[in-house]
């Protein structure tokens, strides 16, 4: 992987992690374009380090607050919201690694993401702020996050959708969605770190990984800030139309054996 490829993949990861269009699905397409299919989940996870940095920077005040009160409600909301993804990830790890490697289902998954975004966008009268979120809300939102273990089901899209279903206001839906991503991304990085000692990284230079992570962090921070402000006043339907178009294109290319 050249540094230019790493930089481009970092941009893809940073932007699509927080736009509701699936970073994993887009990274699969990016890796395929650059002939890096064998890097698979390891490369995707390493690029997630950049977006984790972006979250820590953007939410620094939240994390400082939780560090001062580690047994407070906000901490337990993140714990409760992460439990479903942990359970699904541990039970079906091998299965989802296989479909992430082959990409055979990503066209359909983009279409499903679009459907959820389109339906959720019609929900009105969301009023809950961050302090109003209950543990039941967190568990419900976390259950939707668990669906994003499929490569082209958008994690941020599913958690925003679930938040809107639970009547969070639109800005809070995006804010909590990205905050909830922290333990999920951190957990994925820890699980994939074993590849560092098994040699899965041999085709990727350290310098390229660093460039990709920096690129991911910068564009991830931009995407977080932009998306929270965007969702307060604008529709999710534009993202639904985009992933629908992308999903249909992928299915057509697969049907004609081009992709």
Image: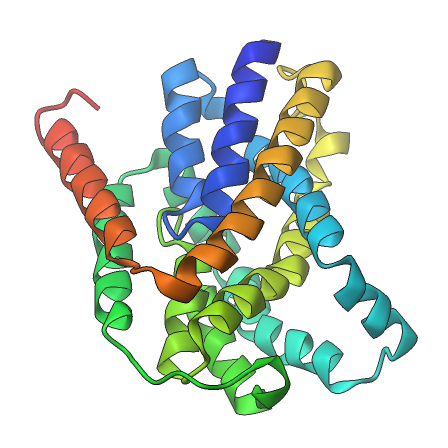
Q: Residue furthest front?
A: 233
Quarter of the view holding residue 196: top right
Residue 71 is left or right of residue 163, and the answer is: right
Quarter of the view holding residue 257: top left
Q: Is residue 49 above or below residue 227?
A: above
Q: Is residue 118 above or below residue 11?
A: below
Q: Position of residue 143 (x, y in %)?
A: 46, 74
Residue 159 is left or right of residue 10, and the answer is: left
Question: Is residue 46 in view?
Answer: no
Tell me the residue at 62%/15% (across/down). Answer: 203
Tell me the residue at 47%/32% (across/down). Answer: 12
Q: Is residue 258 above or below residue 87?
A: above
Q: Position of residue 212 (x, y in %)?
A: 63, 25
Tell me the residue at 30%/80% (across/down). Answer: 124
Q: Position of residue 79 (x, y in %)?
A: 68, 76
Q: Residue furthest right?
A: 68
Report the front residue among 120 and 207. 120
Q: Quadrant of the N terminus?
A: top right
Q: Quadrant of the C terminus?
A: top left
């Amino acid at each position: 992987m050249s540094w230019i490829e790493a930089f481009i993949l970092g941009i893809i990861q940073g932007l699509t992690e927080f736009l509701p269009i699936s970073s994993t699905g887009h990274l699969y397409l990016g890796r395929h374009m650059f002939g890096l299919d064998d890097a698979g989940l390891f490369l995707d996870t390493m690029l997630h380090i950049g977006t984790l940095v972006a979250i820590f920077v953007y939410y620094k005040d939240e994390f400082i607050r939780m560090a001062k009160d580690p047994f407070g409600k906000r901490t337990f909301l993140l714990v409760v919201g992460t439990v479903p993804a942990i359970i699904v990830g541990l039970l079906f790890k091998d299965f989802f690694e296989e479909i992430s490697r082959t990409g055979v289902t990503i066209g359909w998954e983009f279409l499903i993401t679009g459907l959820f975004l389109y339906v959720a966008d019609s929900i009105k009268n969301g009023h809950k702020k961050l302090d109003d979120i209950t543990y039941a809300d967190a568990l419900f939102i976390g259950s939707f996050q668990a669906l994003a273990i499929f490569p082209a089901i958008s994690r941020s899209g599913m958690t925003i959708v679930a938040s809107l279903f639970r009547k969070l206001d639109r800005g809070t839906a995006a804010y909590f969605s990205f905050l909830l991503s922290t333990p999920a991304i951190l957990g994925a990085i820890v699980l994939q770190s074993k590849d560092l000692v098994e040699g899965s990284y041999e085709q990727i230079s350290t310098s390229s990984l660093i460039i990709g992570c920096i690129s991911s962090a910068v564009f991830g921070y931009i995407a977080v800030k932009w998306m929270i402000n965007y969702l307060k006043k604008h529709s999710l339907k534009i993202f639904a139309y985009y992933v629908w178009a992308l999903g249909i294109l992928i299915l057509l290319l697969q049907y004609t054996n081009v992709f």
